[in-house]
């Protein structure tokens, strides 16, 4: 099928590349010229395991091209994905201006034929009708000459950064919201190979469940899924904080409750709390939407509060050990919001850097993917080292912030003599306490 994906970030590029890989003819549109140039040469502008290989294979087969020309994309695609960012505004509501610009532009370039316009971006509940209206406005701007028809489908994305290619070929479910049977049929056809697990790791599994529903429910599913996961993490963090006080080990508790099939093991790891580009903004947007309709989301408000406190708690634990932080050097192991990504949006490391700097500490960091030049404006005070031993050199404490798997096998015994004070705060309960203590570290976990 002919597909156009507008917005080639973490979601759009992975979606476009994977659809091209399975045989569709894809044009990816982005208004960032430098990105388009890079992608056209087969390079990925983001760090996502497996993505360059998928892109290069699709390029070699002539299945994908990249352009800044939205008119070309709209003319080409029978299915048009909107996959631009929807960041949070300062008051917490979703900033839909990029979706609006793209929807208008689609309308302005729709001249004839039938299109399915797919909201892949996470958009506030009710955006299906709103996108329809904006596209119609764009079409009207053609002066009545457009003979095109279209339907809007909500097809929220659930991929996880760091395993985005895997998730695209092995989804837990596909959610399609629309009132148009014609559009839904085309969407099912688009995803046939994926639904039948032809590109899945385990091809023997039964087909991927497809949740066909109305647009509002599809949009709500995305928000509710992220809100649930955020609540689950805040819950175990709250349990960890009680564990700290009563002398229980939250790792044992998480395992013990997670074995209950109604609860499940995932997202029960206590630590510094959730971050990243989605949870914070999506929970805020849901709180905001509920508020617009006169409902106060007590549970979600508390979930956000617990998460904010959890980041501060890591600094408090450091203060308990080191007392005065002014003049101390603190090393952060990891900067990205999670492993296997270069994404720093709403990363807990940012809050730590802010707080530690405010308290007069000098902050150094080492991350397998983020270099000094990758630090955004305002963080030039952080020295990004090129390896963990350089990081440890002269530090009064280390904080494990991101659970990159290579941090498990660092030579910690070699780091101890380099440090002014061998303290480690394991803010993800990720490292082996016994071996760190044997190496000479004072180990502080979260709720253990
Ligand atoms: P992103 O910020 O990485 O990418 C957005 C892309 O859109 C950028 O490349 C930007 O240059 C481009 N863009 C902006 N305006 C444009 C325009 N007018 N024309 C063409 N291109 C334009 O965003 P990301 O992370 O991919 O997120 C996209 C959407 O998917 C958001 O709504 C997000 O909530 C949702 N989502 C994100 C997930 C993630 O893990 N990042 C997972 C699931 C959903």
Image (cartoon, rainbow, N blue to C red):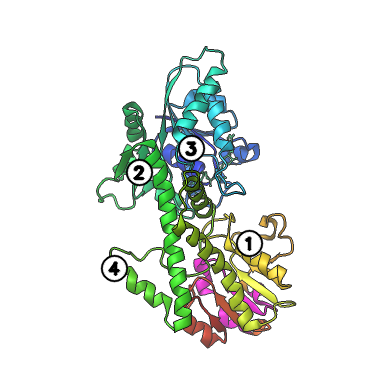
Asked where in the image residue 192 lies, by quadrant, the reply is top left
**Residue with the mark numbered 1:** 350
At mark 1, the secondary structure is: helix
**Residue with the mark numbered 2:** 174
Among the two numbered marks 2 and 4 on one chain, the one whose residue lies closer to the N terminus: 2
Asked where in the image residue 187 lies, by quadrant, the reply is top left
Against 158, is 32 above or below? above
**Residue with the mark numbered 3:** 60
Magenta-colored span? 389-416
Residue displayed at 55% across by 27% down: 104
Among the two numbered marks 4 and 1 on one chain, the one whose residue lies closer to the N terminus: 4
Among the two numbered marks 4 and 3 on one chain, the one whose residue lies closer to the N terminus: 3
User: Cα distance, mark 4 to mark 3?
Assistant: 47 Å
Decide: few, some or many residues near mark 3? Use Cα within 10 Å; few <14, some 14-19, many ≥20: few
At mark 3, the secondary structure is: helix
**Residue with the mark numbered 4:** 260
* Ligand 1's quadrant: top right
User: Of discs 3 and 2, which sits in the foreground?
Assistant: 2
Residue displayed at 37% across by 41% down: 217
User: Cα distance, mark 2 to mark 1?
Assistant: 33 Å
């Amino acid at each position: 099928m002919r597909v156009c994906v507008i917005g080639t970030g973490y979601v759009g590029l992975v979606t476009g590349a994977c659809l091209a890989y399975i045989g569709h003819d894809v044009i990816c549109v982005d208004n960032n010229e430098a990105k388009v140039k890079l992608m056209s040469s087969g390079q990925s502008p983001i760090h996502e395991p497996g993505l360059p290989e998928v892109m290069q294979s699709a390029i070699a087969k002539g299945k994908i091209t990249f352009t800044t020309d939205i008119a070309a994309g709209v003319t080409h695609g029978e299915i048009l994905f909107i996959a631009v960012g929807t960041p949070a505004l300062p008051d917490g509501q979703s900033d839909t201006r990029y979706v609006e610009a793209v929807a208008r532009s689609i309308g302005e370039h729709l001249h004839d034929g039938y299109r399915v316009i797919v909201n892949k971006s996470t958009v506030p509940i009710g955006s299906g009708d709103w996108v329809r209206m904006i596209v119609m406005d764009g079409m009207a701007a053609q002066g009545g000459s457009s003979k095109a028809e279209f339907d809007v489908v909500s097809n929220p994305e659930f991929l996880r950064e760091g395993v985005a290619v895997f998730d695209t070929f092995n989804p837990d479910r596909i959610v399609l919201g629309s009132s148009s049977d014609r559009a839904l049929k085309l969407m099912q056809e688009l995803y046939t190979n994926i639904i039948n697990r032809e590109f899945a790791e385990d091809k023997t599994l039964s087909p991927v469940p497809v949740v066909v529903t109305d647009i509002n429910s599809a949009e709500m599913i995305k928000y509710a899924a992220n809100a649930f996961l955020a609540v689950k993490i805040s819950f175990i963090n709250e349990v960890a904080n009680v564990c700290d006080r009563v002398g229980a080990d939250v790792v044992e508790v998480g395992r013990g409750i997670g074995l209950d099939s109604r609860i499940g093991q995932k997202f029960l790891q206590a630590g510094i709390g959730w971050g990243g580009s989605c949870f914070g903004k999506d929970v805020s947007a849901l709180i905001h939407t509920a508020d617009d309709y006169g409902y106060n989301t007590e549970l979600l408000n508390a979930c956000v509060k617990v998460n904010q406190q959890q980041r501060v708690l890591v600094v408090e634990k450091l203060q308990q050990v080191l007392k005065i932080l002014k003049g101390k050097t603190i090393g952060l192991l990891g900067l990205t919001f999670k492993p296997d990504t270069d994404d720093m949006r709403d990363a807990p490391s940012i809050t730590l850097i802010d707080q530690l700097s405010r308290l007069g500490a000098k902050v150094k960091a080492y991350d397998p993917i983020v270099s000094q030049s990758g630090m955004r404006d305002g963080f030039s005070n952080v020295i990004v080292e090129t390896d963990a031993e350089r990081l440890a050199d002269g530090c009064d404490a280390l904080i494990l912030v991101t659970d990159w798997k290579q941090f498990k096998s660092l030579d910690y015994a070699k780091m101890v003599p380099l440090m002014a004070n061998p303290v480690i705060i394991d803010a993800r309960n990720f490292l082996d306490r016994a071996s760190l203590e044997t190496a000479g570290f004072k180990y502080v976990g979260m709720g253990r």
